């Protein structure tokens, strides 16, 4: 401090202070520019992604959902459905559909991952909605609980997908598909978007942690060995009983016919 007081009236003090001030301003501006640059790049990249998604939408989706995603007599509006709904429907091959009168089935996807991401970004730009997830974000192995997931699945999902997750018939010709072999992110997205006849399980009904537990139980059920041989849909004694009844009754009828022919 004495050194500064001694030379504060020196003729070079003012130029040095000015030089330090300019250096500090320049350093601050450089740091701020470096921080804002990635944001500008991200905004530009997102804008490009949305434009690509819009072109994909106009070519492959607008004939049913409308040029502005407003929907119509054939397909619903996509405004507000969010990126999660698009990722689930398109990445699982359910959309685009050739026949809108039937229930969408899981099949090989028409678009690749980059095209699905672009399409989801475009639909998400129309209005707020549930965001899409990656499989890495769905940490079911670390944060899920198999026992809790099984109980949650039986209480909330088994009435449609059956207690083993193999799917089942619904009213009006609809059906609940099997949940076996489905990617974790798609199971999560289905719960938060409610595709087709499925209800929406928001975070107040089933918390994110409980959703991860359900996924963990499903993944455990996928690798569970079939100790009894053919699973027959894993729906319990009804299927097995029907099979035994049909085969057994057919065998008895065949034996009766054979004995009648032998008696002649």
Image: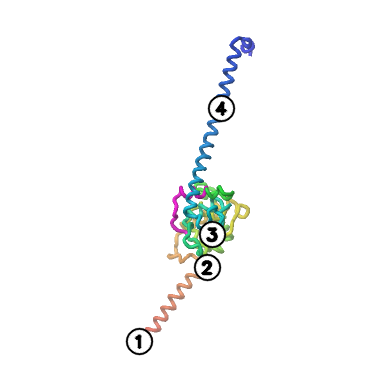
The local secondary structure at tag 3 comes to: loop
Label 3 vs 4, first from the N-terminus: 4
Q: Of discs 3 and 4, which sits in the foreground?
A: 3
Is 93 one of the magenta-colored residues? no
Range drawn in magenta: 106-121
Q: Which residue is identified by label 3?
A: 75
Q: Which residue is located at x 45 percent, y 62 percent? A: 226
Label 1 vs 4, first from the N-terminus: 4
Number of dots carrying numbers: 4
Q: Which residue is identified by label 4?
A: 29
Q: Of discs 1 and 4, which sits in the foreground?
A: 4
In space, the residues marked 2 and 3 are separated at their CA atoms by 19 Å
Q: Which residue is identified by label 2?
A: 173
In space, the residues marked 2 and 1 are separated at their CA atoms by 47 Å
In space, the residues marked 1 and 4 are separated at their CA atoms by 104 Å
Q: Of discs 2 and 1, which sits in the foreground?
A: 2
How packed is label 1: few (under 14 Cα within 10 Å), some, or many (20 or more)? Answer: few
Q: Position of residue 119 (x, y in %)?
A: 50, 50
Q: Which residue is identified by label 1?
A: 262
User: In the image shown, does 195 or 252 lie closer to the viewer?
Assistant: 195
Label 2 vs 1, first from the N-terminus: 2
How packed is label 4: few (under 14 Cα within 10 Å), some, or many (20 or more)? Answer: few
In space, the residues marked 2 and 4 are separated at their CA atoms by 65 Å
In space, the residues marked 1 and 3 are separated at their CA atoms by 64 Å
User: In the image shown, does 242 or 70 lie closer to the viewer?
Assistant: 70
In space, the residues marked 3 and 4 are separated at their CA atoms by 51 Å
The local secondary structure at tag 1 comes to: helix
Label 1 vs 3, first from the N-terminus: 3
Q: Residue furthest front?
A: 67
Is 115 one of the magenta-colored residues? yes
Q: Position of residue 140 (x, y in %)?
A: 52, 50
The local secondary structure at tag 2 comes to: loop
């Amino acid at each position: 401090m004495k050194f500064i007081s001694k030379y504060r009236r020196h003729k070079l003090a003012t130029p040095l202070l000015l030089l330090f001030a300019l250096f500090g301003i320049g350093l601050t501006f450089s740091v701020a520019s470096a921080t804002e640059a990635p944001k500008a790049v991200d905004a530009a990249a997102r804008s490009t992604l949305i434009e690509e998604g819009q072109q994909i939408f106009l070519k492959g989706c607008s004939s049913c959902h409308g040029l502005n995603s407003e929907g119509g007599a054939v397909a619903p509006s996509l405004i507000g459905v969010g990126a999660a709904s698009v990722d689930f429907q398109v990445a699982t091959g359910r959309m685009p559909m050739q026949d809108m009168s039937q229930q969408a089935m899981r099949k090989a996807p028409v678009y690749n991952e980059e095209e699905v991401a672009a399409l989801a970004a475009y639909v998400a730009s129309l209005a707020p909605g549930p965001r899409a997830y990656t499989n890495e974000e769905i940490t079911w192995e670390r944060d899920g609980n198999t026992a809790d997931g099984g109980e949650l699945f039986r209480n909330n999902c088994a009435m449609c997908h059956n207690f083993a997750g193999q799917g089942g018939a619904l009213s009006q010709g609809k059906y609940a598909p099997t949940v076996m072999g489905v990617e974790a992110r798609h199971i999560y997205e289905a719960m938060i978007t409610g595709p087709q006849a499925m209800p929406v399980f928001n975070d107040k009904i089933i918390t994110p942690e409980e959703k991860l537990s359900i996924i963990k139980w499903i993944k455990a059920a996928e690798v569970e060995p079939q100790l009894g041989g053919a699973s027959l849909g894993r729906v319990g004694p009804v299927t097995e009983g029907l099979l035994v009844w049909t085969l057994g009754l057919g065998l008895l009828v065949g034996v009766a016919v054979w004995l009648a022919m032998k008696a002649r």
